[in-house]
């Protein structure tokens, strides 16, 4: 059984690294190490020593220039102190079979780097973006999600309905064009959708869909199924008392269920 070694990357305004590391451990990861981007640049931490990479949420670079835009440029052009391109290290991590999870700002980063959705296997080519919520304001509320059973995503296997909080101002999926949106649907790269909890049907209605995302998309995967990005925060639902209605006895599968799917996949290798 493989050991699951998670690397949670932080810095430049990210503020959900502790929650994310805790969620990884509670989901069965053997290790969950928090490291700064500067640790990668300095060579003190190398991605190849891990098999589960988590890009957590927060206010990365203060969302200046658009959420995760500055960070995407940093990842694309930065070099380590030894002269290695940081992006080559990330490519090597993925090509070696590692899992990647991007939450909120982390999802925005994966999209703007082009790791998601990678239609046609075209990685590191931007095909969709994330823009301002239709409400034109920051949304902080709980949502209900439904997993796509036809998706190749390893994280969402055996998941049907999931509840989690959102807290973002730029969570609206905007595809390059209609053809891109159609291709996402045809390839089943939509891993999670916002649904109306009373009907179980995907919705464009606010507040069940908190941002107006196209086709109610809440999360995307890549063709391999080993990358998942989503706007809701599964790591923030790590105990039953996190649920807003827990005092009334209402509950649902923890957000940790999603991370546990990735852990199970790695342990089975």
Image (spheres, grey):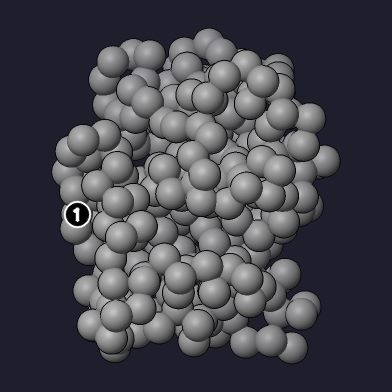
Q: Nearer the viewer, residue 61 or 249?
A: 61
Q: Is residue 33 above or below residue 159?
A: below
Q: Is residue 98 left or right of residue 6?
A: right
Q: How many numbered marks appear?
A: 1
Q: Secondary structure at mark 1?
A: loop
Q: Is residue 260 above or below residue 198?
A: below
Question: Could you say which is closer to the camera, residue 112 or residue 101?
Answer: 112
Residue 158: horizontal and vertical position, in percent?
78, 52
Taking the spot 71% from the left edge, 22% from the top edge, the residue there is 182
- Name the residue beneath numbered marker 1: 13
Looking at the image, can residue 186 be seen?
Answer: yes
* Image coords of residue 6 (percent x, y): 49, 76
Asked if residue 161 shows in the view, the reply is no
At a point 76% along the width and 80% down the height, the residue shown is 269
User: Picture quarter containing residue 190?
Assistant: top right
As displayed, is residue 48 above or below residue 233?
below
What residue lies at 29% left-to-right and 42% top-to-bottom? 69
Could you tell me residue 92's position as x and y percent? 54, 74
Say which residue appears at 30% left-offset and 51% top-offset. 73
Q: Point out the residue furthest to the right here.
A: 150
Q: Position of residue 53 (x, y in %)?
A: 49, 68
């Amino acid at each position: 059984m493989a050991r699951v070694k998670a690397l949670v990357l932080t810095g430049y305004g990210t503020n959900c690294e502790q929650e994310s590391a805790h969620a990884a451990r509670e989901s069965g990861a053997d290790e969950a190490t928090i490291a700064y981007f500067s640790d990668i640049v300095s060579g003190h931490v190398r991605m190849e020593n891990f098999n589960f990479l988590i890009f957590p949420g927060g206010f990365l670079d203060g969302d200046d220039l658009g959420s995760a835009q500055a960070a995407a440029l940093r990842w694309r052009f930065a070099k380590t102190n030894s002269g290695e391109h940081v992006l080559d290290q990330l490519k090597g991590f993925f090509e070696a079979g590692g899992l990647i999870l991007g939450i909120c700002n982390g999802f925005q980063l994966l999209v703007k780097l082009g790791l998601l959705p990678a239609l046609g296997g075209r990685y590191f080519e931007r095909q969709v973006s994330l823009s301002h919520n239709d409400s034109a304001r920051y949304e902080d509320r709980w949502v209900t999600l439904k997993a796509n059973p036809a998706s190749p995503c390893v994280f969402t296997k055996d998941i049907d309905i999931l509840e989690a909080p959102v807290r973002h101002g730029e969570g609206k999926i905007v595809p390059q064009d209609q053809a891109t949106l159609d291709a996402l649907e045809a390839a089943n790269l939509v891993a999670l959708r916002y649904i109306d909890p009373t009907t179980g049907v995907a919705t464009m209605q606010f507040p069940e869909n908190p941002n107006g995302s196209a086709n109610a998309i809440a999360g995307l995967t890549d063709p391999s199924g080993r990358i998942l990005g989503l706007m809701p925060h599964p790591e923030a639902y790590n105990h039953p008392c996190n649920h807003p209605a827990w005092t009334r006895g209402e509950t649902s599968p923890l957000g940790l269920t999603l991370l546990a799917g990735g852990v199970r996949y790695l342990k089975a290798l």
